[in-house]
Image (tube, grey):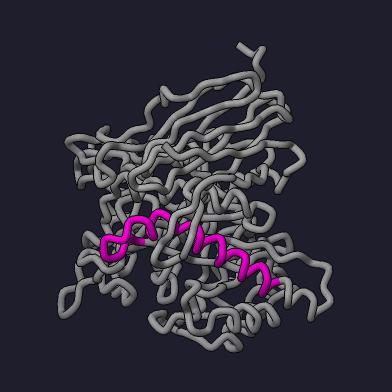
Amino acid sequence: MLTASITLDPAFRVAPVSRRTFGSFVEHLGRCVYTGIYEPGHPAADADGFRTDVLDLVRELGVSVVRYPGGNFVSGYRWEDGIGPRESRPRRLDLAWHSTETNQFGLDEFARWTARAGVEPMMAVNLGTRGIQEALDVLEYANHRGGTAWSDRRIANGTPEPHGIRMWCLGNEMDGPWQIGHKTPREYGRLAAETGRAMRMIQPDLELVACGSSHLGMPTFGEWEATVLEETYDVVDYVSLHAYYEERDGDLPSFLASAVDMDRFIDAVVAAADHVRSRLRSSKRMMLSFDEWNVWYQSGEGSRPPSGDDWPVAPPLLEDRYNVADAVVVGNLLISLLRHSDRVTTACQAQLVNVIAPIMTEPGGRAWRQTSFHPFALTSRIASGEVLRVEPAGPVQDTARFGPVPVVDAVATHDAEAGTTAVFAVNRSTGQRVELDIDARALGAGRVARCLTVADDDPRAVNTPDDPDRVVPYPNPDATVDGARVRVVLPPVSWTVIELTAAQDE
């Protein structure tokens, strides 16, 4: 058995836990919307056609904010197609995913769904085929109280009160050649800045997100951030990051170390943003919105959109089935996001239902939790108070993609008011258990309130509709306390949360 140790101290403060870290993403892609969150006629559908079984799972997942409607989809989207009487809404070709969009679910439905789910809406505007005026129109429709053409249209459509959407993404992945309306960094930066300035003339307190690079490997990475932020720095509040990870060629050790890449990506974008801040002599500190992240098997057959003359409605796309190793990586990516809470204050796992998602559904049938559901739900539920920096001391292992990496990765949160501390840890070893020693003397923690682990003898184990609880968090029996020192045994390929309280608390 390997050994590792961490020390917890309230002086190692990073930043408060941001609830927006636990965001998600709903795009008009595959079955995320249709037969995902929205399915009139389903036995569990409510009067608006929302699947209540999915709503229950979304609440259990602990999602805080949901980004909508894309994604690649938004760069060709006409938002006004999705308002008004459903029988009058036009069907359109969706070029991003080679599908037919029926527009039966639009902005008003999304706003009602977020209210019912208890989550904050985050809206993206089309800066691919459209521009400043269309962004102003949708903002007026969504947020203006009344007395104008678009706000009165919303009222006439049955929503007298404004939707009150605060966060707005200025386009999506505009650095990508696959994007409709792909632009150079200077072209996009100028358009985003002018759009943002105009939107603030309607509502000054908006929170605006500029597109960063689509991923760390983009040839324009760095240059894109510098140029875009030169144009937008005084206008926007966030720059975005997107990253997806998958196991390649059976290289499980590298895949389990995916958070190393996320750490490097975040640090690089922070450096680029701070470089622009220095050049502009600005007192403003740019925040990061990691508004697309997940495990996604992009090389898989199901990731390819249809082609040819067939333009199906809501075809099954990107419906990855996640195993234990995938769940461990998801938990580790959440650890990375938390430890960067001083700069990453918004994040959205992509996506919410069916499409590379923690929740799966059958049309007309069941809904169930994927393995990746569990580390997200537990982290969202338990992480509170302040994020504490944790530096594990212990063994390293070599990986083909990232070189030597620590076997154990961890972060902690401490809620002084509640008197609780939580440690989130992963064991990246594929064959060795690790005894983790936690020194919690500085926090006065001496009792394990609960210790839950996601692991399995088979790291490829998955949940299915017939066996939805094949992989669930289980109480870890190997958690012991000696004074204020806690020892937990982490199985190979595992994610664990240890919740601590003061010894006298019962």
Q: Of 245 and 301, which appears nearest the observer? A: 245
Q: Of 451 and 96, which appears nearest the observer? A: 451
Q: Position of residue 276 (x, y in %)?
A: 73, 77
Q: Quadrant of the C terminus?
A: top right
Q: Quadrant of the N terminus?
A: top left
Q: Position of residue 55 (x, y in %)?
A: 39, 39
Residue visible at 51% across and 52% down in the picture: 406
Q: Position of residue 86 (x, y in %)?
A: 33, 58
Q: Of 450 and 210, which appears nearest the observer? A: 450
Confirm whether residue 159 shows in the render.
Answer: no
Q: Position of residue 204 (x, y in %)?
A: 73, 64
Image quarter of residue 285: bottom right
Residue visible at 25% across and 47% down in the picture: 460
Instruction: Give the answer, above or below, for where 321 lies relative to 415.
Output: below
Q: Of 448 and 366, which appears nearest the observer? A: 448
Residue visible at 47% across and 79% down in the picture: 218
Q: Is residue 64 magenta?
A: no
Confirm whether residue 39 shows in the render.
Answer: yes
Query: Could you tell me what secondary structure mostly forms the magenta stretch?
Result: helix
Q: Is residue 271 magenta?
A: yes
How many numbered callouts? 0
Instruction: Give the answer, above or below, for where 394 lies relative to 440.
Output: below
Q: Give, as a single range, the part of the protein colored magenta.
A: 246-273
Residue visible at 52% across and 35% down in the picture: 436
Left or right of residue 351, residue 144 in this image = right
